Amino acid sequence: MTTIFEQDTMSPAILVTGASRGIGEAVYRRLARDGHPVIGTYHTSSIPAARLAEELEQEPFVQVDLADEASVGALMDGLRGRPLKALINNAGVIEFETFGKFDLGIWQRSFAVHCDAALKLALGLQEAIQDGGSIINITSTDAFLGGFDTLSYAASKSALDSLTKSLAINLGPRNIRANAIAPGWIDTDMGTRFAEYVAGMTPLHRLGRPDDIAGIASFLISDDAAFVTGQTIVADGGYYLVDPVMKWEAADNET
Ligand code: NDP
């Protein structure tokens, strides 16, 4: 099959990490539909990744383990000489931990995938990102909260949120913008088994869909967001605003 890159190899592409499923897949689909050449990465989902690239007539996905420094280096080597319009650090992993039996390995893996990889890709690919281009980091509303059994996840997302602001400050003079999207509960493999409860507590009365995040990514890389940098857009249907006790009290007062 002829890929878009075989037709036009110098078109600035968008790199989306973790595009093989969930939010990353929706972002990949949306940006391809918007007419951008998109390069997706996967870790283990080789078959869905291959199908996706073929369906959308994009070049093949690149395999990478973002927790592995050499693998991240190989990804960047493979992109050498490629102009980029945007870098979207989406890939993520959640590992549950017990506070009393804290596992430093989980902490290190969380930071490696969410922060170290995002930083290395931003630094390593900054020259490839064109004037007017952007970086988007997918964080989480957990970045603003403490974690019971997800403290490594929450801390690493918080650090990624901070990194976004530093990238905005340092890359702004080159007219490269950096923003974060902080999803709330989104219906993916990483989502919650308490979906019904979450929907009930959310002002918009539903979980988020991966497409809800994809639309924001499409906006942030567009010229409509040309003066938006260093920001975190929360997309949680209003869940974060609700104090459960106040909601229950209000319901109780009505009866
Ligand atoms: P999924 O679990 O559905 O998908 C995770 C993606 O990340 C997959 O493409 C996976 O690749 C990739 N990935 C995981 N580990 C690695 C690794 N070590 N190296 C490279 N790639 C890796 O997650 P979501 O789509 O739900 O989440 C996407 C982002 O959104 C994450 O950063 C997550 O933290 C964040 N988020 C999600 C929320 C939710 O409720 N779903 C809420 C808030 C934030 P593969 O499939 O090939 O293994």
Image: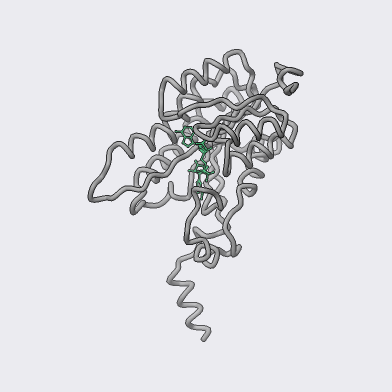
Give percent across and percent down for residue 11.
Answer: 71, 20
Mark yes or no: residue 65 visible: yes
Residue projecting furthest to the top: 81
Residue projecting furthest to the bottom: 255
Q: In the depicted view, which residue is nearer to us: 33 or 216?
A: 33
Give percent across and percent down for residue 166.
Answer: 47, 31
> Image check: 95 left or right of 240?
left
Q: In the depicted view, which residue is nearer to us: 222 or 63?
A: 63
Answer above or below: position of 27 versus 170.
below
The residue under the point 55% across, 49% down is 188
Count numbered badges in the picture: 0
Mark yes or no: residue 177 visible: no
> Image check: 236 left or right of 5?
left
> Image check: 149 left or right of 28?
left
Residue projecting furthest to the left: 100
Q: Quadrant of the N terminus?
A: top right
The residue under the point 66% across, 35% down is 52
Res 18 → quadrant = top right
Answer above or below: position of 35 versus 189.
above
Which scheme is used to colour this image of the protein? one colour
The residue under the point 43% across, 71% down is 245
Give percent across and percent down for residue 34.
Answer: 74, 36
The residue under the point 23% across, 47% down is 101
Answer above or below: position of 174 versus 182.
above
Res 109 → quadrant = top left
Res 216 → quadrant = top right
Answer above or below: position of 128 versus 40.
above
Give percent across and percent down for residue 138.
Answer: 52, 40
